[in-house]
Amino acid sequence: MAKRSCPCGLPAPYVEFRAHFSRAGRTGHMHEVSRFVRENGAWVYLDAAPT
């Protein structure tokens, strides 16, 4: 299995979130690539990677 790096170009485990929503008749979206680190056996949020 090939290792994939974060879309931001930094080697780290990541999760990519995409949310689409509507509120008061207007639509919007959010996009974030979040990086994580392993601490004491648990995955911990590190930061939002630059995209």
Image (cartoon, rainbow, N blue to C red):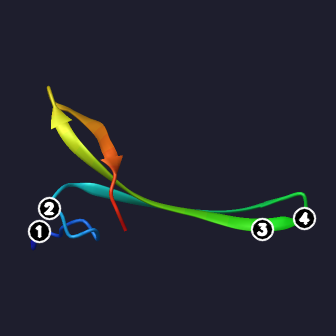
Disc 3 residue crowd, few under 14, some 14–19, many 20+, Cα 10 Å: few
In the image, residue 32 lies at what x, y percent? 45, 59
What's the amino acid at mark 1?
A: Lys
Q: Are marks 4 and 3 in contact (CB under 8 Å)?
A: no
Q: Which residue is mark 2?
A: 11
Q: Which residue is mark 3?
A: 27
Q: Quadrant of the N terminus?
A: bottom left
Q: Residue at x 90, y 64 (%)?
A: 25
Q: Which residue is mark 1?
A: 3
Q: Residue at x 28, y 56 (%)?
A: 14
Residue furthest to the front in view is 50
Residue 2, located in which quarter of the rendered image?
A: bottom left
With 15 as the anchor, is 24 left or right in this view? right
Q: Which residue is mark 4?
A: 25
Q: Are marks 1 and 2 in contact (CB under 8 Å)?
A: yes
Real-space CA distance between mark 2 and mark 4, rounded to the nearest whole angstrom: 40 Å
What's the amino acid at mark 3?
A: Thr
What's the amino acid at mark 2?
A: Pro
Disc 1 residue crowd, few under 14, some 14–19, many 20+, Cα 10 Å: few
Q: Secondary structure at mark 3?
A: strand
In the image, residue 29 lies at what x, y percent? 64, 65
What's the amino acid at mark 4?
A: Gly
- Asked if 42 appears above or below 35 in the picture, the reply is above
With 21 as the anchor, is 16 left or right in this view? left
Real-space CA distance between mark 1 and mark 3, rounded to the nearest whole angstrom: 35 Å
Between residues 32 and 17, which one lies in front from this camera angle?
A: 32
* Sequence-first disc among 1 and 2: 1
Real-space CA distance between mark 4 and mark 1, rounded to the nearest whole angstrom: 42 Å
